[in-house]
Image (spheres, rainbow, N blue to C red):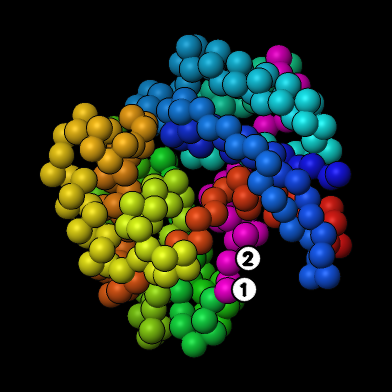
Protein backbone atom coordinates (compact mmCIF):
# COMPACT_ATOMS: atom_id res chain seq x y z
CA UNK A 1 0.00 0.00 0.00
CA UNK A 2 1.40 3.36 -1.07
CA UNK A 3 0.88 6.12 1.48
CA UNK A 4 1.60 9.81 1.02
CA UNK A 5 1.43 12.62 3.57
CA UNK A 6 0.86 16.36 3.34
CA UNK A 7 1.87 18.87 5.99
CA UNK A 8 0.31 22.30 5.69
CA UNK A 9 1.72 24.93 8.06
CA UNK A 10 -0.90 27.66 7.83
CA UNK A 11 -1.44 30.94 9.68
CA UNK A 12 -4.33 29.55 11.71
CA UNK A 13 -3.67 25.81 11.96
CA UNK A 14 -1.06 23.20 11.12
CA UNK A 15 -2.39 20.05 9.42
CA UNK A 16 -1.16 16.58 8.65
CA UNK A 17 -3.07 14.54 6.07
CA UNK A 18 -2.10 10.91 5.56
CA UNK A 19 -3.63 9.40 2.42
CA UNK A 20 -3.79 5.93 0.92
CA UNK A 21 -3.04 6.01 -2.79
CA UNK A 22 -5.60 4.21 -4.95
CA UNK A 23 -5.46 3.13 -8.58
CA UNK A 24 -8.19 2.54 -11.14
CA UNK A 25 -8.62 2.70 -14.91
CA UNK A 26 -8.57 6.54 -14.79
CA UNK A 27 -5.20 6.68 -13.06
CA UNK A 28 -4.26 7.39 -9.47
CA UNK A 29 -6.30 8.97 -6.69
CA UNK A 30 -6.33 8.86 -2.92
CA UNK A 31 -8.47 8.07 0.08
CA UNK A 32 -8.00 10.11 3.25
CA UNK A 33 -6.71 7.93 6.03
CA UNK A 34 -5.88 10.29 8.90
CA UNK A 35 -6.17 14.04 9.38
CA UNK A 36 -4.67 15.86 12.36
CA UNK A 37 -5.22 19.59 12.86
CA UNK A 38 -3.40 21.65 15.50
CA UNK A 39 -4.57 25.28 15.93
CA UNK A 40 -1.20 26.97 16.52
CA UNK A 41 -2.13 30.45 15.21
CA UNK A 42 1.32 31.32 13.92
CA UNK A 43 -0.25 34.28 12.12
CA UNK A 44 -0.79 36.22 15.36
CA UNK A 45 2.99 36.39 15.84
CA UNK A 46 3.90 36.78 12.18
CA UNK A 47 1.51 39.60 11.30
CA UNK A 48 1.88 41.60 14.53
CA UNK A 49 5.57 41.12 15.42
CA UNK A 50 6.91 39.87 12.07
CA UNK A 51 8.57 36.99 13.87
CA UNK A 52 7.41 33.76 15.50
CA UNK A 53 7.80 33.78 19.31
CA UNK A 54 9.93 31.24 21.19
CA UNK A 55 6.81 29.59 22.67
CA UNK A 56 5.20 29.08 19.29
CA UNK A 57 8.46 27.83 17.78
CA UNK A 58 8.60 25.22 20.54
CA UNK A 59 4.97 24.22 19.88
CA UNK A 60 5.62 24.02 16.14
CA UNK A 61 8.70 21.81 16.64
CA UNK A 62 6.75 19.49 18.98
CA UNK A 63 3.94 19.31 16.40
CA UNK A 64 6.41 18.46 13.63
CA UNK A 65 8.03 15.76 15.80
CA UNK A 66 4.58 14.26 16.42
CA UNK A 67 3.76 14.43 12.70
CA UNK A 68 7.08 12.74 11.86
CA UNK A 69 6.34 9.94 14.36
CA UNK A 70 2.87 9.44 12.89
CA UNK A 71 4.27 9.32 9.35
CA UNK A 72 6.77 6.66 10.49
CA UNK A 73 4.08 4.57 12.20
CA UNK A 74 1.82 4.80 9.13
CA UNK A 75 4.80 3.91 6.91
CA UNK A 76 4.40 6.95 4.69
CA UNK A 77 6.48 6.58 1.51
CA UNK A 78 6.52 10.24 0.44
CA UNK A 79 5.57 13.54 2.00
CA UNK A 80 5.65 17.24 1.22
CA UNK A 81 5.58 19.89 3.95
CA UNK A 82 4.67 23.48 3.00
CA UNK A 83 4.47 26.67 5.04
CA UNK A 84 2.45 29.61 3.74
CA UNK A 85 1.73 33.24 4.58
CA UNK A 86 2.77 33.46 8.25
CA UNK A 87 6.15 31.83 7.68
CA UNK A 88 6.67 33.94 4.54
CA UNK A 89 6.26 37.00 6.70
CA UNK A 90 8.22 35.91 9.78
CA UNK A 91 11.76 37.29 9.78
CA UNK A 92 12.94 34.15 11.59
CA UNK A 93 11.19 31.80 9.14
CA UNK A 94 14.37 30.31 7.65
CA UNK A 95 15.87 29.83 11.10
CA UNK A 96 12.73 27.88 12.15
CA UNK A 97 12.97 25.69 9.01
CA UNK A 98 16.52 24.78 10.06
CA UNK A 99 15.43 23.94 13.63
CA UNK A 100 12.59 21.74 12.35
CA UNK A 101 15.06 19.87 10.13
CA UNK A 102 17.46 19.32 13.05
CA UNK A 103 14.94 18.49 15.78
CA UNK A 104 12.10 16.80 13.89
CA UNK A 105 13.86 15.61 10.72
CA UNK A 106 11.13 17.17 8.58
CA UNK A 107 11.97 19.17 5.44
CA UNK A 108 9.64 22.16 5.50
CA UNK A 109 9.45 24.49 2.52
CA UNK A 110 8.25 28.11 2.68
CA UNK A 111 6.22 28.60 -0.49
CA UNK A 112 5.33 31.76 -2.38
CA UNK A 113 1.74 32.77 -3.10
CA UNK A 114 1.86 31.54 -6.72
CA UNK A 115 3.09 28.08 -5.73
CA UNK A 116 0.38 28.01 -3.07
CA UNK A 117 -2.24 28.71 -5.77
CA UNK A 118 -0.69 26.01 -8.01
CA UNK A 119 -0.88 23.44 -5.20
CA UNK A 120 -4.55 24.28 -4.64
CA UNK A 121 -5.13 23.82 -8.44
CA UNK A 122 -3.61 20.35 -8.21
CA UNK A 123 -7.03 19.31 -6.84
CA UNK A 124 -8.23 19.60 -10.47
CA UNK A 125 -11.71 20.70 -9.55
CA UNK A 126 -11.94 22.22 -13.04
CA UNK A 127 -12.65 18.66 -14.25
CA UNK A 128 -16.11 18.99 -12.72
CA UNK A 129 -16.76 22.52 -13.96
CA UNK A 130 -19.42 23.51 -16.46
CA UNK A 131 -17.64 24.48 -19.68
CA UNK A 132 -20.33 27.11 -20.38
CA UNK A 133 -19.43 29.06 -17.24
CA UNK A 134 -16.41 31.05 -16.15
CA UNK A 135 -15.21 30.82 -12.57
CA UNK A 136 -13.49 32.89 -9.93
CA UNK A 137 -11.63 30.51 -7.65
CA UNK A 138 -11.30 31.90 -4.12
CA UNK A 139 -9.08 30.25 -1.50
CA UNK A 140 -9.19 32.06 1.84
CA UNK A 141 -6.49 31.37 4.41
CA UNK A 142 -5.36 32.96 7.65
CA UNK A 143 -2.82 35.25 6.02
CA UNK A 144 -3.68 35.43 2.35
CA UNK A 145 -6.38 34.97 -0.26
CA UNK A 146 -5.50 33.23 -3.52
CA UNK A 147 -7.65 34.17 -6.51
CA UNK A 148 -7.74 32.55 -9.94
CA UNK A 149 -9.93 33.06 -12.97
CA UNK A 150 -10.91 29.97 -14.99
CA UNK A 151 -12.20 30.33 -18.56
CA UNK A 152 -13.18 27.14 -20.43
CA UNK A 153 -11.70 25.15 -17.53
CA UNK A 154 -8.29 26.81 -17.98
CA UNK A 155 -6.72 29.15 -15.39
CA UNK A 156 -6.09 32.43 -17.24
CA UNK A 157 -4.99 34.62 -14.32
CA UNK A 158 -4.11 34.19 -10.68
CA UNK A 159 -2.82 36.34 -7.82
CA UNK A 160 -2.22 36.11 -4.10
CA UNK A 161 -3.30 38.97 -1.80
CA UNK A 162 -2.23 39.64 1.79
CA UNK A 163 -5.79 39.52 3.05
CA UNK A 164 -6.68 36.68 5.40
CA UNK A 165 -8.77 35.87 8.44
CA UNK A 166 -6.05 36.14 11.11
CA UNK A 167 -4.65 39.25 9.45
CA UNK A 168 -8.11 40.89 9.61
CA UNK A 169 -8.66 39.85 13.25
CA UNK A 170 -5.29 41.39 14.12
CA UNK A 171 -6.14 44.56 12.15
CA UNK A 172 -3.19 43.97 9.87
CA UNK A 173 -5.12 44.06 6.59
CA UNK A 174 -4.40 47.22 4.62
CA UNK A 175 -6.93 49.33 2.76
CA UNK A 176 -4.66 49.55 -0.28
CA UNK A 177 -4.45 45.72 -0.46
CA UNK A 178 -8.27 45.53 -0.53
CA UNK A 179 -8.30 48.16 -3.27
CA UNK A 180 -5.60 46.32 -5.23
CA UNK A 181 -7.67 43.13 -4.97
CA UNK A 182 -10.85 44.95 -6.07
CA UNK A 183 -9.15 46.43 -9.15
CA UNK A 184 -7.52 43.11 -10.08
CA UNK A 185 -10.84 41.25 -9.81
CA UNK A 186 -12.71 43.91 -11.81
CA UNK A 187 -10.02 43.88 -14.47
CA UNK A 188 -9.81 40.09 -14.76
CA UNK A 189 -13.53 39.37 -14.77
CA UNK A 190 -15.00 42.32 -16.68
CA UNK A 191 -15.32 40.44 -20.00
CA UNK A 192 -16.48 37.16 -18.49
CA UNK A 193 -20.22 36.78 -18.33
CA UNK A 194 -21.85 33.91 -16.49
CA UNK A 195 -19.36 34.02 -13.63
CA UNK A 196 -19.67 31.51 -10.78
CA UNK A 197 -17.50 31.09 -7.71
CA UNK A 198 -15.47 28.22 -6.31
CA UNK A 199 -14.53 28.47 -2.66
CA UNK A 200 -11.91 26.52 -0.73
CA UNK A 201 -10.48 26.69 2.79
CA UNK A 202 -11.64 25.52 6.21
CA UNK A 203 -14.12 28.35 6.73
CA UNK A 204 -16.13 28.02 3.54
CA UNK A 205 -16.20 24.25 4.10
CA UNK A 206 -17.69 24.86 7.55
CA UNK A 207 -20.21 27.42 6.20
CA UNK A 208 -21.24 24.96 3.50
CA UNK A 209 -21.81 22.28 6.13
CA UNK A 210 -23.86 24.72 8.21
CA UNK A 211 -25.99 25.56 5.16
CA UNK A 212 -27.15 21.92 4.98
CA UNK A 213 -27.05 21.95 1.19
CA UNK A 214 -27.30 18.69 -0.73
CA UNK A 215 -23.77 17.55 -1.64
CA UNK A 216 -22.74 19.16 -4.93
CA UNK A 217 -25.30 21.98 -4.75
CA UNK A 218 -23.69 25.44 -4.84
CA UNK A 219 -24.05 27.85 -1.93
CA UNK A 220 -26.03 30.93 -2.97
CA UNK A 221 -24.98 34.48 -2.17
CA UNK A 222 -28.22 34.98 -0.21
CA UNK A 223 -27.69 31.85 1.87
CA UNK A 224 -24.10 32.85 2.64
CA UNK A 225 -25.19 36.37 3.59
CA UNK A 226 -27.90 35.05 5.88
CA UNK A 227 -25.48 32.61 7.58
CA UNK A 228 -23.03 35.47 8.08
CA UNK A 229 -25.73 37.72 9.60
CA UNK A 230 -26.78 34.89 11.90
CA UNK A 231 -23.21 34.21 13.07
CA UNK A 232 -22.40 37.91 13.38
CA UNK A 233 -25.41 38.59 15.60
CA UNK A 234 -23.88 36.42 18.34
CA UNK A 235 -20.86 36.89 20.57
CA UNK A 236 -17.83 34.63 20.18
CA UNK A 237 -18.90 32.59 23.19
CA UNK A 238 -22.42 32.17 21.81
CA UNK A 239 -21.08 31.14 18.40
CA UNK A 240 -19.11 28.35 20.07
CA UNK A 241 -22.15 27.15 22.02
CA UNK A 242 -25.03 27.65 19.57
CA UNK A 243 -23.29 26.55 16.37
CA UNK A 244 -20.98 24.04 18.03
CA UNK A 245 -17.89 25.69 16.53
CA UNK A 246 -14.32 25.14 17.72
CA UNK A 247 -12.98 28.28 19.46
CA UNK A 248 -10.33 28.68 16.73
CA UNK A 249 -13.04 28.52 14.05
CA UNK A 250 -15.66 30.70 15.77
CA UNK A 251 -13.64 33.91 15.38
CA UNK A 252 -12.10 33.46 11.90
CA UNK A 253 -15.38 32.41 10.29
CA UNK A 254 -16.59 36.05 10.43
CA UNK A 255 -13.73 37.68 8.46
CA UNK A 256 -13.73 34.69 6.07
CA UNK A 257 -17.42 35.25 5.31
CA UNK A 258 -16.69 38.95 4.76
CA UNK A 259 -13.97 38.15 2.20
CA UNK A 260 -16.25 35.78 0.24
CA UNK A 261 -19.25 38.15 0.40
CA UNK A 262 -17.14 41.13 -0.71
CA UNK A 263 -15.69 39.26 -3.69
CA UNK A 264 -19.13 37.99 -4.72
CA UNK A 265 -20.53 41.54 -4.52
CA UNK A 266 -17.69 42.97 -6.62
CA UNK A 267 -18.19 40.38 -9.35
CA UNK A 268 -21.95 39.83 -9.19
CA UNK A 269 -21.40 36.12 -8.46
CA UNK A 270 -24.70 34.63 -7.27
CA UNK A 271 -23.48 31.18 -6.28
CA UNK A 272 -20.33 29.49 -5.10
CA UNK A 273 -19.35 25.84 -5.47
CA UNK A 274 -17.64 24.33 -2.43
CA UNK A 275 -15.67 21.19 -3.37
CA UNK A 276 -14.47 20.83 0.25
CA UNK A 277 -10.82 20.37 -0.60
CA UNK A 278 -7.87 22.39 0.56
CA UNK A 279 -4.12 22.85 0.58
CA UNK A 280 -3.40 19.40 2.09
CA UNK A 281 -5.47 17.64 -0.61
CA UNK A 282 -3.61 19.67 -3.23
CA UNK A 283 -0.24 18.55 -1.83
CA UNK A 284 -1.27 14.86 -2.07
CA UNK A 285 -2.47 15.38 -5.65
CA UNK A 286 0.78 17.13 -6.52
CA UNK A 287 2.79 14.21 -5.10
CA UNK A 288 0.68 11.81 -7.21
CA UNK A 289 1.28 13.93 -10.34
CA UNK A 290 5.02 14.20 -9.74
CA UNK A 291 5.62 10.56 -8.78
CA UNK A 292 2.95 8.37 -10.36
CA UNK A 293 1.22 10.09 -13.27
CA UNK A 294 4.38 10.77 -15.23
Observer able to see residue 182: no
Residue 10 left/right relative to 238: right
On residue 127, the disc is: 1
Is residue 143 one of those drawn in magenta?
no
| Location of residue 62 (image quadrant) | top right
Is residue 120 one of those drawn in magenta?
yes
Provide the secondary structure element on which disc 1 rests: helix
Judging depth in this view, the residue of 75 and 197 nearest the camera is: 75
- The image shows residue 157 at horizontal and vertical percentages of 51, 69
Query: What span is colored magenta in the figure?
Result: 103-128
Judging depth in this view, the residue of 197 and 217 nearest the camera is: 217
Rounded to the nearest angstrom, the CA distance separating label 2 from label 1 is 6 Å
| Location of residue 131 (image quadrant) | bottom right
Judging depth in this view, the residue of 183 and 274 nearest the camera is: 274
Q: Residue at x 46, y 64 (%)?
A: 215
- The image shows residue 173 at horizontal and vertical percentages of 30, 42
Estimate how packed mark 2 is, as few (under 14), some (14 to 19) or many (20 or more) residues with alpha carbons within 10 Å: few
What quarter of the picture does the C terminus occupy?
bottom right
Residue 35 left/right relative to 151: right
Judging depth in this view, the residue of 241 and 168 nearest the camera is: 241
Q: Indicate whether 188 appears above or below 291.
A: below
Q: Which residue is mark 2?
A: 124
Amino acid sequence: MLRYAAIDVGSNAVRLLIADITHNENGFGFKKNTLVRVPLRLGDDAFLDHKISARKIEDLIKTMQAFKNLMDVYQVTKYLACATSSMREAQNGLEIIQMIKEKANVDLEIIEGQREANIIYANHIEDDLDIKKNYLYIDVGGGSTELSVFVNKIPVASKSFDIGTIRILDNQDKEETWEEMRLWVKDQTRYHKNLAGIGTGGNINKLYKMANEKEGTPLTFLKLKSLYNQLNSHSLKERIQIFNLNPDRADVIIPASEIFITLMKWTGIKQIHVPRVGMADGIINLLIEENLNK
